[in-house]
Amino acid sequence: MQHLFSILALGLVLSPDAQANEENTFGVFQVNASLTTGPASGFRQVFVDANDLNSLLKPAAARAGEPNGQLVIENISTAWARVHVGETLVGIIGPLTTGRLQNVTAGTYTVSMELPNGYTKKVQIGTVAADGTAVTPQAPPAPAADQPDASPEAE
């Protein structure tokens, strides 16, 4: 029995780590986001028509003048989560996984992730550019300088 315990302990010491080392990874398995081209990637199940995401999802705060982007949703829990964007149930995302919703209106979205134990995490997530780079909000146009009146008022 002692030899069996020693062999099992040695096996645990020499086994590779099974943890998330990078974005969208779990243990030795990696998902290359650049090879996933669907409108809703990283989800175990999708409950809406992925091609209609732009019309179904409305940002809590839209950013006018910016092109459509992607909404990157990161599940940092070790359990799957039901993902709601606003009031729309989008789908189920796996543990320690990053989901991406492509071609959504630029802005900030309210995202709720409901875990199997009933806990719900609600976050505000802003869209990023289609290539994954952060989008810097465009500055509003500067107001025109006040022009002094050509004829001062007589008192």
Image: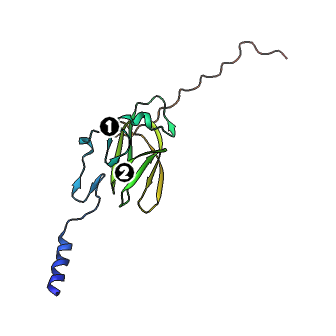
Q: Residues within 10 Å of mark 2 (few under 14, many from 20)?
A: many
Q: Which tag, 2 or 1, sits closer to the chain's start?
A: 2
Q: Residues within 10 Å of mark 1 (few under 14, many from 20)?
A: few
Amino acid type at mark 2: Ile
Q: Residue at x 26, y 41 (%)?
A: 34
Q: Is residue 26 above or below residue 61?
A: below
Q: Position of residue 108 (x, y in %)?
A: 47, 41
Residue 150 is at least partly visible in this image: yes
Q: Position of residue 107 (x, y in %)?
A: 46, 37
**Which circle marks residue 73 in the picture?**
none
Q: Residue at x 55, y 26 (%)?
A: 142
* Left or right, 107 with reference to 10: right
Amino acid type at mark 1: Asp
Q: Position of residue 76 (x, y in %)?
A: 37, 57
Instruction: State the quadrant of the N terminus.
Output: bottom left
Q: Position of residue 77 (x, y in %)?
A: 38, 59
Q: Nearer the viewer, residue 56 or 104?
A: 56
**Which circle marks residue 131 in the picture?**
1
* Left or right, 63 with reference to 41: right
**Which circle marks residue 92 in the picture?**
2
Q: Is residue 72 above or below residue 130?
A: below
Q: Residue at x 34, y 40 (%)?
A: 132
Residue 105 is at least partly visible in this image: no
Q: Is residue 123 above or below residue 35?
A: below
* Left or right, 42 with reference to 86: left
